[in-house]
Image: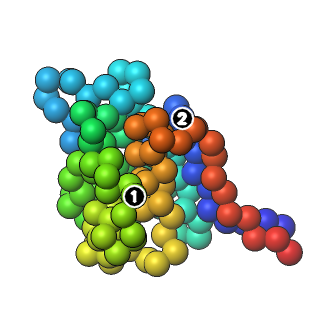
Amino acid sequence: MTSGYRFSVGRAKGAAGSTVNRESESGTGRGHGSEGVRAAVDPGICGFICSIRAWKEGKEVKFDIQSECGQIKKLAADLGPVQMKNLFVPLTKSPIFLCAEKSRCHLACPIPSALVKTAEVVLGLALRKEVSIRFLT
């Protein structure tokens, strides 16, 4: 029996929940393609599937995050655009992880890491590759 976290980067159907749309009204968000990069995150036992859409504007990444989780809704509301340079700082200085802490995300929540990974893909710093944690018996 295996269980664990899994998120995929690519074309994904959105999860039900709140949406914080940070795309400019002019539609200039470009990312990779006109829709940017999409990721679906299954965080495990909590069951709060998360949908992430990220796109690039200049050297910044903007996010549209959907989830039924209260902490992720708060993270989505508080998180502004992330600059490329902030993907290379320690966790204690990362705007993504600072927002996760402020919104009281569980320490093991994979959503903040998924945001970092998705931002890296948008900026061409990483390839699209699924990530998983499997517990082996």
In this view, the residue in front, 60 or 88, is 88
Q: Residues within 10 Å of mark 1 (few under 14, many from 20)?
A: few
User: Which quadrant of the figure contains the N terminus?
Assistant: bottom right
The residue at 58%/45% (across/down) is 8
Determine the CA span between mark 1 and mark 2: 23 Å
- Report the label total: 2
Most extreme residue toward the left is 25
The x and y percentages for residue 11 are 52, 32
> Amino acid type of disc 2?
Gly
Residue under label 1, please give it: 88
In this view, the residue in front, 5 or 80, is 80
As drawn, 51 above or below 106: above
The residue at 48%/41% (across/down) is 125
Identify the image quadrant of residue 137: bottom right
The residue at 32%/56% (across/down) is 86
Residue under label 2, please give it: 10
As drawn, 128 above or below 79: above
Identify the image quadrant of residue 72: bottom left
> Amino acid type of disc 1?
Phe
Horizontal side, residue 36 vs residue 129: left or right: left
Q: Residues within 10 Å of mark 2 (few under 14, many from 20)?
A: some
